[in-house]
Every structure is written in C-alpha cells, then in structure tokens.
C-alpha cells in the first residue's frame, strides 16, 4: 500500500521557479531514502536529486546542481524539489521515488510515484 503522490508541476518560463512535492504514505517515512528523477520524450529516465533518510546528505545531477534543491520534512511525510532558474531542457515528467529499507537496513525496495509534468517554455 505504499503510495507516492507528486504535485506542483506545471508551466514555467525560462528563469522561473517551481516547487514539487511528494506526499508519501504506506510506510514509515523515516525508513525511506527519497529521490527525484525525470524523463522527457526520447531520453532515458535520469536521477535528478536524492536525499538520505535523515536529510543529512544530498546528491544532484550535474545538469541541475546549483539550481535545484531537494529537502524532506519527516514530520509531514513529504519530500520537496525546489527548482530555480528553470531551463527548457528541464521539461520532463518528474517522478518521486522512495527507497524503503528494512529494520535491519540490509534490504530495500524501491517505489515510484506516477509523476508530475513540468514544462519550461517561453
């Protein structure tokens, strides 16, 4: 019953900003490392940003480094992606992923949301 629901996508102009949200349910949120990936037509899905269970570590794709920020609020079971200085090449469907670890942290399973469309165009 793990469920990830993305929101916040839409249309933005180049140089604009959007904030994506991913609301998680069906698992203990603080056992899940979270990430955002994206996929545009003709391209493979790529990892955009990832954040550790406690939020103490983050990683970003080179293409978004310095422009995007991933964060999480464990009290709200939500992960965010703040997207600034948007470019047309950021246009894609953005997917939230949860990597849920076992209590012993020796096994995990990945779950994906359905995605939210981001379009950057003048």
Image (spheres, rainbow, N blue to C red):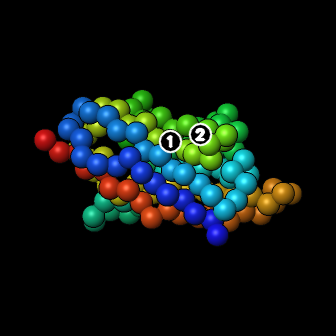
Residue 69 can be seen, yes or no: yes
Tell me where residue 42 sits by quadrant: bottom left
Q: Residue at x 50, y 41 (%)?
A: 80
Please identify the residue farthest to the right as the structure is shown.
Answer: 104
Q: Whole-percent x and y of residue 110?
A: 62, 64
Alpha carbon of mark 1 to alpha carbon of mark 2: how far? 6 Å
Q: Residues within 10 Å of mark 1 (few under 14, many from 20)?
A: many
Q: Mark 1 or mark 2: which comes first in sequence?
A: 2
Image height check: is 105 above or below 84?
below
Q: Whole-percent x and y of residue 118?
A: 31, 50
Q: Which residue is mark 2?
A: 72
For residue 28, side relative to residue 116 (left or right): right
Q: Which residue is mark 1?
A: 80
Q: Residue at x 34, y 49 (%)?
A: 9
In this orientation, which residue lies closer to the viewer: 11 or 83?
Answer: 11
Residue 62 can be seen, yes or no: no
Image height check: is 69 above or below 107?
above
Q: Whole-percent x and y of residue 76?
A: 62, 42
Tell me where residue 1 sits by quadrant: bottom right
For residue 76, side relative to residue 16 (left or right): right
Numbered badge on residue 101? none
Image height check: is 115 above or below 18?
below
For residue 73, side relative to residue 107 (left or right): left
Tell me where residue 108 sits by quadrant: bottom right
Q: Residue at x 20, y 38 (%)?
A: 13
Give yes or no for contact between labels 1 and 2 (Cβ–Cβ under 8 Å).
yes
Q: Residue at x 65, y 50 (%)?
A: 33
Please identify the residue farthest to the bottom as the structure is shown.
Answer: 1
């Amino acid at each position: 019953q793990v469920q990830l629901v993305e929101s916040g996508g839409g249309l933005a102009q180049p140089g604009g900003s959007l904030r994506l949200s991913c609301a998680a349910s069906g698992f203990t949120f603080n056992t899940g490392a979270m990430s955002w990936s994206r996929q545009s037509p003709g391209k493979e899905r790529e990892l955009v940003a990832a954040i550790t269970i406690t939020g103490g570590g983050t990683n970003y794709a080179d293409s978004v480094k310095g422009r995007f920020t991933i964060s999480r609020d464990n009290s709200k079971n939500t992960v965010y992606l703040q997207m600034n200085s948007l470019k047309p090449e950021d246009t894609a469907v953005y997917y939230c992923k949860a990597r849920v670890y076992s209590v012993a942290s020796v096994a995990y399973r990945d779950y994906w949301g359905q995605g939210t469309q981001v379009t950057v165009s003048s």
